[in-house]
Image: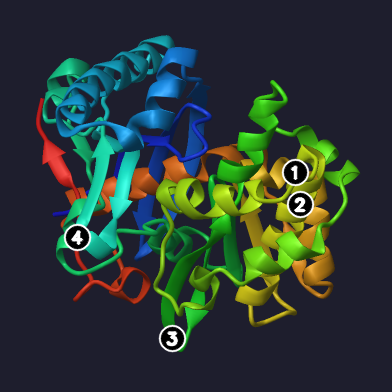
Amino acid sequence: MLKQFYNVIGVMSGTSLDGVDMAHIHFSIDAGVWHFEILETETVPYSQEWFNKLKNAVQFSESELIQLNFNYTKLLAEIINDFIAKNNIENLDAVCSHGHTILHQPQNGFTLQIGNLPEIAKLINQKVVCDFRVQDVKLGGQGAPLVPIGDQILFSNYDYCLNLGGFSNVSFIENNARVAFDISPVNTVLNFYANQLNLDYDDKGLIAQLGKLNQYLFEELNALPFYSKSHPKSLGFEFVKETVLPLIEKHPISRADKMHTFTIHIAFQIGKALSHKKAKLLITGGGAYNDFLIEEIQKQLPEMEIIIPNKKILEYKEALIFALLGVLKLRGEMNVLSSVTGAKMNHSSGKIFIN
């Protein structure tokens, strides 16, 4: 007999490198309908040393990656233990953790999320469900995005669910099946230029707003082959490092102009990706705080009703959904949609480690 109530923690570290997001969540299922309550939440920022390691790990050798994975698993365990102790959380069914993506090359049959070593269960003395992407890539899928099944189960009252994080991704129903894909880089590029100005990020998009549009750069960005590919498709930091940043750097313009032009590019690509122009659009992720970007998206989609939810959902939606993926895995139920990732079939992904 499957349980009706689950007490779990969702753990997520995204490509924006903001830190480790944790959310304590109660799930219940009643007559096939899932309900959730987000309780305590916290984002633990990375130290400068860890930020630099994770940012540069794409260039690490195999032996360096093995060591990094071990050290990061220990770091993650410490962060989770602190969160559990601080909030007096007891009787957990599981900790459901995404880990941190270092390499994502589905075209080469390869994806690596660190922090998913079996030791983590013993280090935190909890059952752990993690490493959700690897199986999908083995089944011929992109291994991403994984959030759409959560959109389908928990946020079905919106036509589009758009996340603005390191990259933008969207999920929606098309021909009676959930589809989802990455649209473009977002904070992976905007934060790169904010960092050059000794800022963690461009607050509300104020610096970008002061810049001017460079038409040549705008057109070159929109001409990148990724944008004309059909979905399923996904992006990794490699695309930013090898393709996008070198293209932007060719232009001798101010950082504000680069950020302005890239923001308009993000909004333009989102406008292109959403075919129903008059619908309900839920926006989550750190980019939802970028007022300039939201205004530009609204300009591209003047008839779209844009909804930005409460702070807990906005900031912890991915942690919430990875918690749900873990619960579905514990129940032996499908948690990855082949219509989204392009895998051979729907499947129940993730590894379960017992403490």
Q: Quadrant of residue 307?
A: bottom right
The Cα atoms of the two marked residues, 2 and 4, are separated by 34 Å
Q: How is the image coloured?
A: rainbow
The Cα atoms of the two marked residues, 2 and 3, are separated by 30 Å
Circle 1/circle 2 CB separation < 8 Å: yes
Q: Nearer the viewer, mark 1 or mark 4?
A: 4
- Residue occupied by mark 3: 176
Quadrant showing the C terminus: top left
Q: Nearer the viewer, mark 3 or mark 4?
A: 4
Q: Give the SS element for disc 4.
A: loop
**Depth check, front residue: 25 or 129:** 129
**Depth check, front residue: 321 or 207:** 207
**Around disc 1, counting alpha carbons within 10 Å, would you say few (fewer than 14), some (14 to 19), or many (20 or more)?**
some
Q: Tag on residue 109?
A: 4
Q: Nearer the viewer, mark 2 or mark 4?
A: 4
Q: Tag on residue 219?
A: none
Instruction: Give x and y (percent) for residue 39.
Output: 50, 31
**Around disc 3, counting alpha carbons within 10 Å, would you say few (fewer than 14), some (14 to 19), or many (20 or more)?**
few
- Residue occupied by mark 2: 293
Sequence order check, earlier mark of 2 and 3? 3
Sequence order check, earlier mark of 3 and 4? 4
Q: Amino acid at mark 2?
A: Leu
Q: Tag on residue 290?
A: 1
Residue at the far bottom in the pictured view: 175
The Cα atoms of the two marked residues, 1 and 2, are separated by 5 Å
The Cα atoms of the two marked residues, 1 and 4, are separated by 35 Å
Classify 216 as above or below 200. below
Q: Residue sitting at 54 percent across and 72 percent down?
A: 227
